[in-house]
Amino acid sequence: MEARQQGLLEKQPLQEVDEDVVAALSNSVSDEEREEMQVELDKLEEEISTLRQVLTAKEKHHAELKQKLGVNPLSEFRQNFNKSWHEMQTSTAYRKTQETFSTAGQKASAALSNVGTAISRKFGDMRNSSSFKSFEEKVESTVSTLKSKVGVPSNSGGSFEEVLSSTAHVSAQVTPAVATKLAEQ
């Protein structure tokens, strides 16, 4: 087992292995083929250099034209953004998502409408209940008592809203001295 691990741990520089492969290949290539390869390599390097010079000239001309047209990085960004936004909006995924949200919104709206109707119905039921009517009578009685003590003419038989409104009106008219007098009685 130690011998096996030692074999894995042996370090042979990668360069030596590469050099051996290169040496083996170079032995199989003749001097004439090697010269042809070198000539081809030189031509390729020259073409690459020429292409770089042409590309640099074209990039410079491109920049000059953009400057003359008034195209700056911000307007390019805006144009690219608008194009991307349009492409996204016309995509199938966006349209499906939009339809899904629209359907969900309609269902949520219908559900909230149903909840509002149910709440209104419950308030109506509560207002017609005996305990609410008892509470309403007690409020009307208290307001009538307050009105008689303050000296405001009493309108008997008013609705609950009228009673609350008149109570608020009476409360606004009561001064601290009157409030103290009422508390003493």
Image (cartoon, rainbow, N blue to C red):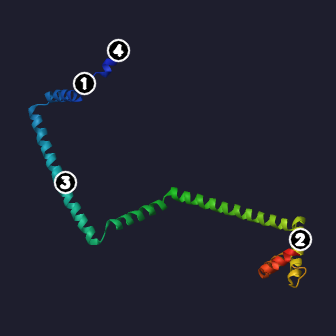
Q: Residue 135 at what x, y percent from top left?
A: 87, 68
Q: CA distance from mark 1 to mark 3?
A: 40 Å
Q: Earlier in the sequence, mark 4 or mark 1?
A: 4
Q: Is residue 13 above or below residue 38?
A: above
Residue kind at label 3, given as amino acid type: Arg
Q: CA distance from mark 4 to mark 2?
A: 101 Å
Q: Badge 2: few (under 14), some or many (20 or more) residues near its Cα, within 10 Å? A: few
- Label 3 belongs to which residue? 52
- Label 1 belongs to which residue? 12
Q: Earlier in the sequence, mark 1 or mark 2?
A: 1
Q: CA distance from mark 1 to mark 2?
A: 103 Å
Residue kind at label 1, given as amino acid type: Gln
- Label 2 belongs to which residue? 138
Q: Earlier in the sequence, mark 1 or mark 3?
A: 1
Of the two numbered discs 2 and 3 in the rendering, the one whose residue sits closer to the viewer: 2
Residue at (88, 85) in percent of width and height:
153
Residue at (45, 62) in percent of width and height:
85
Q: Which mark is residue 2?
A: 4
